[in-house]
Image (cartoon, rainbow, N blue to C red):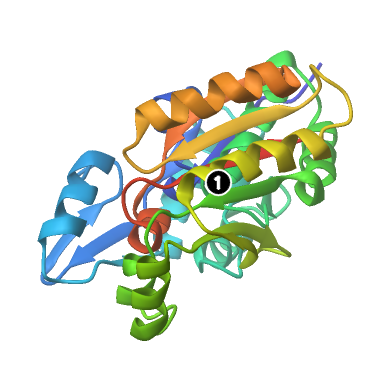
Amino acid sequence: MSAKIAIVTDSIADLGELAVDITVVPLTITFGSQQFRDGIDLTAEQFYDKLEHDQNQPKTAQPAPAAFDEVYRTLLDGGAEHVVSLHASAELSGTFNSASLAASQVASDRITVIDTRNASAGEGLLVLGARDQAARGDSVDAVVEQARADIPNDMLFAAIPTLTYLARGGRIGQLQSLLGNVLQIVPIITLKDGVVSEHSKVRTFARAVDQIIDIVASKVPKKRHARCAVMHSVAPELAQKVCDRLEAAIEPASMITTCAGPTVGTHAGPGAVGVFFIP
């Protein structure tokens, strides 16, 4: 008989209503003196409204180990035989470290904490895969082994329409931001070894989207095999167009759409779009 497996993640996974049978531990977002729990006290739409109109630059903070401690104990006491806890790249957030510390204090032999080396919907794809395996009755070893096998194949290519928010967050110089916006230079962003990096630059946002579709199609060797997630920052119509083009290009085995939360949105701003996929 298979073990009853509970799946845990953090709000960086941006799963929203897709987080069925998944326990999501929220990060904290701060605007000045105001604090919010991601996805609980502050929706994605409310976050982007504040991002545009609040003079304070938002800051995100990982959950404390105590938050994971409480979740793990509740799940194990409630009948779970094992917890598989999947989290955003340790290069991008301290969330994995908080979860690992809590697991060591609660029951390290009954909790497996995984660094997905990813974020947002890329993390979400791995979480949903683990959830589905657990629901099918797969063993703990099978769930963990598959997640770890998928991690190096979980890719992202995203386009950011303006460099303004990257500059506000101190990620690039103000001059570069101004120059990039004037020339309409759009970076295509990827993730490499859990770290955000630049894949290429193009002259317009529309060309960036075209290139993302071409890149994904080139990296999916067989149609109907890839798991895909289209991430957007309050740009649902754009996300739907990208979904439609991907459906035509690669006919993915599964497709989800998510709105990027504060961790991504703070730096990308509204109007960004990205494709995460596991070929």
Q: Residue at x 81, y 27 (%)?
A: 139
Q: Residue at x 15, y 55 (%)?
A: 50
Answer above or below: position of 155 versus 264: above
Q: Tell me if 210 is positioned left or right of 264 in this view.
A: right
Q: Residue at x 34, y 61 (%)?
A: 266
Residue 44 position within the rendered picture, expressed as x and y whole percent measured from the top left: 28, 42
Disc 1 crowd rating (10 Å Cα; few below 14, some 14-19, many 20+) is some
- Can the viewer see residue 63 in this picture? no
Residue 247 position within the rendered picture, expressed as x and y whole percent measured from the top left: 64, 18
Q: Where, by quadrant of the figure, is residue 162 drawn?
A: bottom left
Quadrant containing the C terminus in the rendered view: top right
Q: Residue at x 51, y 47 (%)?
A: 120
Answer above or below: position of 178 versus 144: below
Question: Residue 97 versus residue 103: which sits nearer the camera?
Answer: 97
Q: Secondary structure under badge 1?
A: helix
Residue 183 position within the rendered picture, expressed as x and y whole percent measured from the top left: 42, 67
Answer above or below: position of 81 versus 152: above
Q: Tell me if 118 is positioned left or right of 37 in this view.
A: right
Answer above or below: position of 157 versus 232: below
Residue on which the image places disc 1: 207
Quadrant containing the N terminus in the rendered view: top right
Q: Tell me if 33 is positioned left or right of 166 in this view.
A: left
- Can the viewer see residue 249 in this picture? yes
Q: Where, by quadrant of the figure, is residue 176 drawn?
A: bottom left
Question: Residue 61 versus residue 172: which sits nearer the camera?
Answer: 172
Q: Where, by quadrant of the figure, is residue 224 drawn?
A: top right
Question: Residue 196 versus residue 207: which sits nearer the camera?
Answer: 207
Q: Amino acid at mark 1?
A: Arg
**Residue at the farthest right position:** 221
Question: Residue 245 versus residue 58: which sits nearer the camera?
Answer: 245
Residue 9 position within the rendered picture, expressed as x and y whole percent measured from the top left: 52, 44
